[in-house]
Every structure is written in structure tokens, then in C-alpha cells.
Image (cartoon, helix red, strand yellow):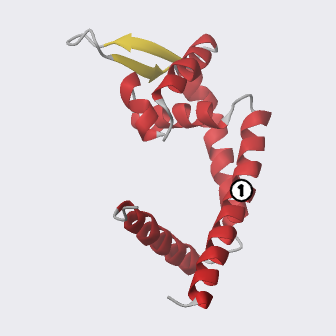
Amino acid sequence: MTSENMKQSLKLYIVLSRANKAINEVTNEFFQQNGLNPTEFAVLELLYHKGKQPLQQIGNKILLASGSITYVVDKLEKRGYLNRVSCPTDRRVTYAEITKEGSDFMDQLFPEHEKHLHDMLSVLTSDEKETAISLLKKLGLSIKDLSY
């Protein structure tokens, strides 16, 4: 491994981190303007697109610690965006389910979010996006296999 290769890896890490930070800052500001934080949006988006979900599994699906999910679900429930629903066959399981109000809210918000993302990423051609998706997938999957 040459010194140049190591410097290039460091540079890639920095560029990826800065691009991620720039995208997150814009999307987080958009969520805030619409009365949500990123985690609240992630929970609503999951329920909006995938339907009701067991509370115990939401954290894994949106990459968040399970302790934080209860707090986020409480906040969204108070706002009328979701309900907790007991599982009829297993008392240990409770589902989060988006309400009509939550669905109506996401009907308005999600297309705007999608457009903002598209606008931010429009600097890349369709082919460049496909290449980036493929390369970043390859990178992410390969890191899982490494052990330190």
C-alpha cells in the first residue's frame, strides 16, 4: 500500500463526508421548516411507504437506537400523525401505524422532499448517478466484511 493510495483513501473519505454533510444540512432544514426533525421524518416516511411496523423493528429500519424510537413515536402520536396499535395475536408486539392526518401530511411533504433531493443531485447525469450508486453500494457492502 503506497502513501499515495492512503492519501487518496483519506481524500475520498473527506469528500464523501462533506457531500453527506451538505445534503443533510439542506434536507434537515427542509424538515425543520415543516415542523419535523430528521428522525421524525424517517419514521413517518417508513410508515407512509411500508405500512404499519412493529415498534421494536423501526429503529433498525431507520438506523436509530430503539430507546429514541419511543420518544419520537410519542411526539408523532401527540401530533396525530400515527397511532400505536396492539397486535391481536401477540400482546408483546405493538405496531406504529400512520394516520389519515399523517398520510395527508406526507402526501404534501414527500413530493417536495423528493424534488429537493433531485434538484441537489441534478449536477450529476443519470449515468453518473448510476455509477455513484453502484460504487457506494460496493463500498458499503465490502466494509461489513472487514473486521478490525
Q: Is residue 111 left or right of residue 33?
A: left
Per the image, the residue denoted by label 1 is: 21
* Furthest-left residue in this view: 89
How far across and how far down the image is residue 71, in percent?
57, 19
The correct choice, above or below, for 89 with respect to 24 in the image is above
How far across and how far down the image is residue 139, in percent?
45, 70
Instruction: Determine whether the residue tagged by mark 1 lies in a helix, strand or loop.
Output: helix
The correct choice, above or below, for 143 with respect to 46 in the image is below
Name the residue located 40 percent from the left edge and 23 percent from the top edge.
55
Q: Is residue 11 left or right of residue 138?
A: right
Q: Quadrant of residue 3?
A: bottom right
Q: Quadrant of residue 49?
A: top left
Q: Report the front residue among 23 and 1.
A: 1
How far across and how far down the image is residue 14, in percent?
68, 69
How far across and how far down the image is residue 102, in percent?
57, 24
Name the residue located 72 percent from the left edge and 63 percent from the top edge.
18
Name the residue located 58 percent from the left edge and 79 percent from the top edge.
128
Q: Report the front residue among 60 and 49.
A: 60
Q: Amino acid at mark 1?
A: Lys
Name the residue located 59 percent from the left edge and 19 percent from the top edge.
76
The correct choice, above or below, for 21 with respect to 125 in the image is above
Q: Is residue 53 visible?
A: no
Q: Is residue 69 visible?
A: yes
Q: Quadrant of residue 16?
A: bottom right
Q: Is residue 138 left or right of residue 70?
A: left
Quarter of the image that includes the C terminus: bottom left
Would you call the spot at circle 1 few (<14 residues within 10 Å), some (14-19), or many (20 or more)?
few
